[in-house]
Image (spheres, rainbow, N blue to C red):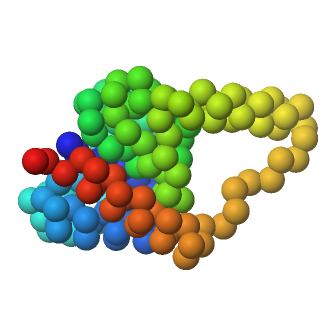
Amino acid sequence: MKIWVDADACPKPIKEILFRAATRTGIALTLIANQMLAVPRSPHIRAVQVPKGFDVADNEIARRVEIGDLVITSDIPLAAEVIAKGGRVLTPRGETYDQGSIAAALTMRNFMDTLRSTGVETGGPAAFSASDQHAFARQLDRELTRHKPA
């Protein structure tokens, strides 16, 4: 298993949790972004910079992900691609997507996009909070424990 991070929009506290987890478990962690990222010196952690452009980082993650890998993203179309390839998805707020939940998430995303395109103010997501950070850490631990090599 490898962990891939859609790092352009990933909150700093989540990256720090992931750095500690990669160091503790030895699982390969790769952050992909269209900007340079500072990451700790570790044989388990690396950052990959991709060219700027719409969905370039997402496309790179989708290209690299393999069955059983974990992707950290809040991008629902990317999550759908990852799941279709046999990967698992965890959002920075600690939510998971799987075969059973991704279709509903895509439908809601598309519905909200339609509303926004007609001029309806839908608001944005709530500010990232400490409870989101704790939910992420708990769910990450569950994912790492569940998929620990025998």
Query: Which residue occupies 89% across, 31% down?
Result: 118
Name the residue furthest top. Answer: 84
Query: Which residue occupies 19% across, 51% down?
Result: 148
Residue 65 shown left or right of residue 10 in the figure: left
Q: Is residue 122 visible?
A: yes
Is residue 15 or residue 139 the one in the foreground?
139
Name the residue furthest bottom. Answer: 130
Above-or-below relation of 83 to 123: above
Q: Is residue 36 visible?
A: no
Residue 43 shown left or right of residue 64 in the figure: left
Query: Which residue occupies 77% across, 36% down?
Result: 112
Residue 87 at x, y percent in the picture: 34, 34
Above-or-below relation of 10 to 119: below
Above-or-below relation of 138 to 3: below
Residue 67 at x, y percent in the picture: 26, 30
In the picture, residue 52 is in which quadrant?
top left
Residue 128 shown left or right of residue 48 in the figure: right
Residue 111 at x, y percent in the picture: 77, 31
Total marks shown come to 0
Query: Which residue occupies 16% across, 62% down?
Result: 25
Residue 94 at x, y percent in the picture: 50, 57
Residue 92 shown left or right of residue 61 in the figure: right
Could you tell me which quadrant the N terminus lies in? top left
